[in-house]
């Protein structure tokens, strides 16, 4: 994924200023693509120059007023083409895993402390994502596996459509929030993987150092 497409996606969801985009990248979009405010402002200029976005008109322009941007038809077309594009998965490059491999040759040194530090960071990130899920997608999270909740009859508890001939597997939520939730679930599962793997790595290093 590229930063320009991340920005186009965010602006289609909600027209925003550069500052607002930075906050959104920090709070939600960051679970699949991170960027600094300098990178965001630089890309906004490029997207505007390319005719993909425009600054919304200001009734009374004032010095220092935030410029809000919206996506133009050409920007939407660019995003549609990018979504339809075929792209292979990117090879994994993880420097931390490589450091563990090197430690097999030169000794673990202070690596256990670094594993503990990384473990703490991933635990915090996991908790953040889970809080976002609870706050924004609580009505979709049907259980610990995060699958979308099914509509039920408020009186009988039966799944909606069970007696009326409707689809028994109908789920709450529209396309936008269900796909947003799906991406967040990927972030949650990835953080769970890192927490579990780092706990295993810490136990292994403690045994080796002992």
Image (cartoon, grey):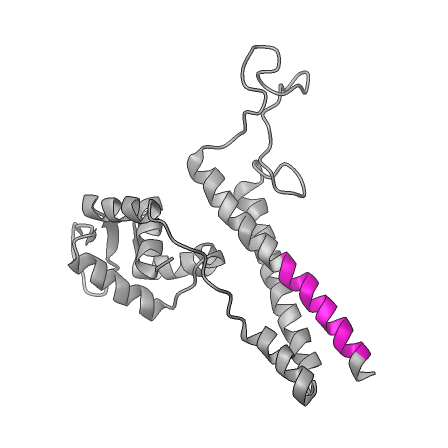
159 versus 76 height, above or below: above
Residue 66 is situated, as x and y percent measured from the top left of the image, at 26, 59
Residue 182 vs residue 106, the one in the foreground:
106
Q: Quadrant of the C terminus?
A: bottom right
Residue 3 is situated, as x and y percent measured from the top left of the image, at 34, 60
| Residue at 35% across, 51% down | 10
Q: Quadrant of the N terminus?
A: bottom left
| Residue at 51% across, 65% down | 92
Which image quadrant is residue 196 in? bottom right
Residue 120 vs residue 5, the one in the foreground:
5
Q: Is residue 64 found inside the magenta-colored segment of the image? A: no
Start-end of magenta stretch: 192-207
Residue 159 is situated, as x and y percent measured from the top left of the image, at 63, 21
Which image quadrant is residue 190 in? bottom right
191 versus 95 height, above or below: above
| Residue at 78% across, 78% down | 206
Residue 45 vs residue 102, the one in the foreground:
102
């Amino acid at each position: 994924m590229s930063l320009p497409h991340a920005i186009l996606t965010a602006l289609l969801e909600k027209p925003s200023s550069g500052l607002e985009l930075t906050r959104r990248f920090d709070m939600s979009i960051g679970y699949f693509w991170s960027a600094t405010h300098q990178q965001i402002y630089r890309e906004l200029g490029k997207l505007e120059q390319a005719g993909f976005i425009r600054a919304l008109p200001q009734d009374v322009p004032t010095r220092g007023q935030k410029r809000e941007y919206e996506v133009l038809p050409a920007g939407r077309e660019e995003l549609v083409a990018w979504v339809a594009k075929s792209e292979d998965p990117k090879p994994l490059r993880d420097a931390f895993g490589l450091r563990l491999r090197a430690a097999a040759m030169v000794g673990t040194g202070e690596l256990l402390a670094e594993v503990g530090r990384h473990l703490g960071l991933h635990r915090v990130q996991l908790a953040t994502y889970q809080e976002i899920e609870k706050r924004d997608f609580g009505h979709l999270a049907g259980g610990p596996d995060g699958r979308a909740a099914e509509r039920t009859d408020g009186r009988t508890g039966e799944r909606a459509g069970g007696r009326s001939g409707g689809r028994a597997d109908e789920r709450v939520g529209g396309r936008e929030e269900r796909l947003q939730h799906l991406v967040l679930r990927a972030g949650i599962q990835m953080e769970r993987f890192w927490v579990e793997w780092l706990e295993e790595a810490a136990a292994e290093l403690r045994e080796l150092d002992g």
